[in-house]
Image (cartoon, rainbow, N blue to C red):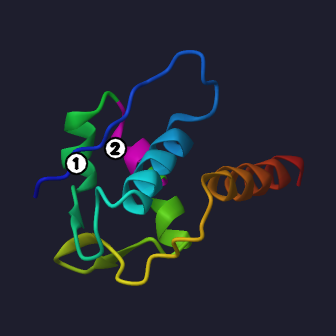
Amino acid sequence: MNFVLEFELNQEDHRPTYLRLAEAIVSAIRLGRIKPGDELPSTRELCKQLPVSRGTIRKTYQIPFEKGCIGARPGSGTFVTEKTPMFLHLRDLTHSRTSAESSRKTS
């Protein structure tokens, strides 16, 4: 597995880390750095590469999973889907997730 996620913890960006990581993953897919069928690192492997918790990585993977960009194969890992929606804009990831969180907090 040759997955390298270009991610920098920008202290000036106050959005949650998992959203910024999800954007980095989707951006890498859209730019062709990660291709359909490529395996992503396990949550355990990725939290060793980045200064974030495994829970943050799980939350990160959930966003592109919900959008159809990645999928899980039980016992095999997490992969970029063959039919990744390339029309997906990064702001769609952030907007849909933060809107859902806001509505949960006000409920």
Answer left or right for 89 relative to 62.
right
Instruction: Please count the marks in the image.
Output: 2
Q: Which residue is mark 1?
A: 44
Indicate which disc residue 11 carries. Answer: none
Amino acid type at circle 1 is Arg
Q: Which residue is mark 2?
A: 54
Q: Position of residue 107 (x, y in %)?
A: 88, 55
Most extreme residue toward the top is 11
Answer left or right for 65 relative to 14.
left
Q: Position of residue 17 (x, y in %)?
A: 51, 35
In the picture, the quarter occupied by the N terminus is bottom left
Question: For the residue carrying disc 2, how many other residues have a C-alpha within 10 Å: few (<14), some (14-19), or many (20+)?
Answer: some
Q: CB atoms at circles 2 and 1 under 8 Å apart? A: yes
Answer left or right for 58 relative to 48.
right
Look at the picture and state if 55 lies above or below 9: below
Magenta span of residues: 52-59
